[in-house]
Image (cartoon, rainbow, N blue to C red):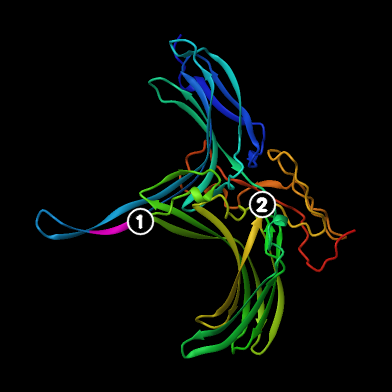
Amino acid sequence: MSEAGDEDRELYVEFDNSNEVFLPGQLISGRVKFQTEKKYKARAVNIKFEGKAHTTWDEYESRRYTGSDGETHHSRERIPYYSTVIFADFQKMLWSCTNDDNIMPAGNYIWPFSFEVPPYCPPSFEGEYGYIRYSVKAEVDRPWRFDDTKRRCVTVSPWLDLNQIPGTLQALHDEDSENVGCCCFKKGFIEIKVDIPKTGFVSGEIIPIHVHVLNRGTVPVNMATVKVYQNSKYTAVRRGDTIKYTGISSNLQVYGSSERKEARNKVVEAEQKLDIQPGNQQSLDLQVQLPSIVPSISQHSPTISVDYTVQVEIDTDATFNSSSKCELGLLIGTVPIRQYLPPVIYPENPAAPLMPPQPISSPGQPVPSAPPLYEDSFYGPDGTKVDADQNSGPFAPKYPVYSGLPIYNPSAPPME
């Protein structure tokens, strides 16, 4: 009997959890399926669970040297910067050949597997200069041949409970006064004050923004724009470094000759036309709803961090330097603030998945769905171009999105 060719065999990885989202401390379980219509040369079948943060980019440095002609020359040298932080690296053997010929008989094979996600894993994230990525890889080890492999990326999404974090109920305030116009053509001051009733929000929630505009200038105010930005920061080491993360940040030494990159991506935007004539003022309320986005990343991630800001900009008819703007920082979590409920009770088993609380709306409003739906990242599979071909198909991490959450009102009385 001849050996199986590419068209005669198939390798699959399936998960028991169909949405392929896992919590730190939870088991990733499933099965590897292998089908071969003919005998197959193979030593073993292995399964690997890997989680890592990886950042990478190039810097360029000028270099001066003396050539063979005795003249001084200049060149640009490409310097790679990258870092890899290993959060999980586990491997198990599912099958091994028992004969000296390393022959796997034709047939259908199913091997179950399970791995525990370490408790200190940060959320999955795909960014411009790097990623935090988790994957399960099945591999058929073949002697003197290319191995057969199938890699499936999964989402790790830790609970970031806004009720357990100090300051998430703190109201935000900022103000700005800008003398619009240019040089000798100044048009006077535009003053704005911006208020947001709290700091912490979750995907699917509406952010209420109160804006007060005072036009002390000589040109009309014509537009208010609010934008939410995702700000990501990346650290990489000159000529590279790899470390294994154990949950203790003090053990990390990745900053010896490091550089940082930053990226800013718009999440959502809303506009409102205005007509505030000189000498007048107006108050307005704007709203934006957060799509599926990664929660703020500041813990257990030494090389990648993510935070969010709200920018409110007031524009005028001035030709140059025509606007005044304020910017306020947000904290994005995965468990919403319970305006009307007692504290959540966590299970004794830390490996058990935590059920998010069921926020209760004020009278007359619908109760939001719980648990939340997990939706693909707002940025889709194009969140990064770094190692984008690692998965067996297009991949976008999934994040919890709540529907029907009431707009936060700090003055609303608790429900009995």
- Helix, strand or loop at mark 1: strand
Instruction: Measuring from the top left, give residue 211's x and y in whole percent.
Output: 68, 75
How crowded is the residue under tag 2: few (<14 C-alpha within 10 Å), some, or many (20+)?
some
Answer with left or right where residue 408 lies relative to residue 128: right
Mark carried by residue 59:
1
**Magenta span contains residue 61:** yes
In the rendered image, the vertical position of residue 49 relative to residue 370, given as above or below: above
In front here: 256 or 14?
Answer: 256
Q: Nearer the viewer, mark 2 or mark 1?
A: 2
Label 2: state its secondary structure: loop
Asked if residue 64 lies left or right of residue 343, the reply is left
Kindly identify the amino acid type of the residue bearing the numbered disc 1.
Glu
Q: Disc 2 versus disc 1: distance between alpha carbons?
A: 35 Å
Write the start and end of the magenta stretch as one range: 59-63
Up the image or down, 44 lies above or below 373; here it is: above
Total count of labels: 2
Looking at the image, which residue is at 60% across and 56% down? Answer: 296
Q: Which quarter of the picture shows residue 41? A: top left
- How far from the left and from the top, in percent, is residue 12? 56, 27
Furthest residue in direction left, as rendered: 69
Front position in the image: 348 or 194: 348
| Circle 2 residue | 160
- Which comes before the other along the chain, label 2 or label 1? 1
Residue sitting at x 43%, y 52%: 236
Q: Residue at x 32, y 57 (%)?
A: 60
Measured from the top left, where is residue 65 in percent x and y?
A: 18, 57
Q: Does residue 264 belong to the magenta stretch?
A: no
Q: Amino acid at mark 2?
A: Leu
Q: Is residue 411 left or right of residue 378?
A: right
Q: Quadrant of the C terminus?
A: bottom right
377 or 158: nearer the viewer: 158
